[in-house]
Image (cartoon, rainbow, N blue to C red):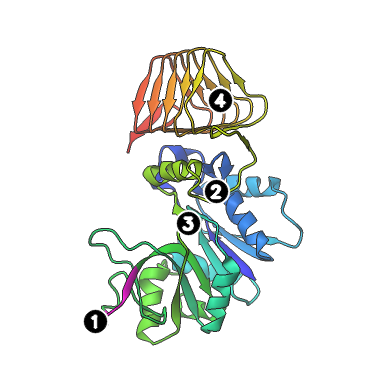
Amino acid sequence: MKAIILAAGLGSRLRPLTNDIPKPLVPFVNTPLLDYHINFLKSYGIDELAINLHYLPDKIRQHINKLDTPESLKIRYSWEGDLLGTGGGIKKMANLLSRDTIVILNSDILINFDLSAAIAFHKKNKALATMVLNPYEPLGNRKGVAIDSQNRIRQVADAPDCAEADLKQLMFAGIHIIEPELTEYIQDDNPSCINADVYPLLIKMGMPVYGYVLPKDCWRHVGTAESYLLAHNEFMDAKLPFEIPLAQDETRIWKGDNVFISLKARLIPPVILGSHTTLEAKSIVGPYTVLGEGCRIGEEASISHSVLWDGVQIGAGSRLNKCVTAADTVIDSFQMFDRQLIASGQYREF
């Protein structure tokens, strides 16, 4: 089996957090998203992986070089000087892989489902492509992916316009399973979107395009500040089935090694404390707060409903609520932030 990770995006919706880090390296519970994806694919026997690069490509290469990946997993990179879109990017990467069924993942999702069951569904239906679908219906007036009673896709967003009755509207989960022949329907050297340009064409042609519906609570999007914080909250509420290398006690507090907590500090669960963190006197951390490795929370500072990346320093008396701070950010004493993305003196409300 082969796989593709779409990692070339700019991460614009998470700026300024992604000013200095590509979106695939954004941490979820102190582990980069890309690590989850690679480990997930390895666990299902993927032996070739292609990753497209555009924004801060060297950081992704350097990070992967540090990972403990087996020799049996061959990783290839596809450089895009100009972004090719999902269609063009997939076609270019597919040409780097030996011909076989390909699993494709967006880089801004969290997944933990039975991939082998999805692949078996794809092969049983002799599908050219299978879109993996979120079991939740679209919100408001948004249209998603419409499937019939046989799980065959009849409509993607608004195209083609399908008048069939009894179609079920679901949301695309950012995961595809395709046969390499699909790339023959993607134009060469032109930016394109596989969902907007390729799938509607295949549906009109009557090609076998199917939808595999995920179970609930095994998928989350984390590409916006709101969804990123929500995913952390759901993990701490045991609504997302992910494992992390930190010990949890009976009060829903996770701790790494060498954590120093002043006797006068206060923790309000659930809280995750990375290794080598320090909480000074009268500081308050929690609820629903994640501290990365090497964070320091100053005296009388208060952090709630927030995620702090590695090495963040919070000055005395500061207050953060529903915030995300980039790695190594330093916040001066007595600063107040609410619903902010914060990085090296740059802030953005969300």
Precedes in sequence: disc 1 or disc 4 = 1
Q: Secondary structure at mark 3?
A: strand
Q: Which residue is mark 1?
A: 163
- Residue 247 visible (yes or no): yes
- Above or below for 346 versus 133: above
Task: Give the numbered dot on residue 295.
Answer: 4
Precedes in sequence: disc 3 or disc 4 = 3
Q: Secondary structure at mark 2?
A: helix
Q: Which residue is mark 3?
A: 219
Q: Which residue is mark 2?
A: 33
What's the distance in space between the residues labelled 4 and 2, CA to CA? 20 Å
Task: Residue 80: give x, y in percent of width and height.
Answer: 51, 59
Of marks 1 and 2, the one in the foreground: 1
Residue neighbourhood size for the residue with mark 3, other residues' Cα within 10 Å, grouped as few (<14), some (14–19), many (≥20): many
Residue neighbourhood size for the residue with mark 4, other residues' Cα within 10 Å, grouped as few (<14), some (14–19), many (≥20): many
Residue 60 magenta = no
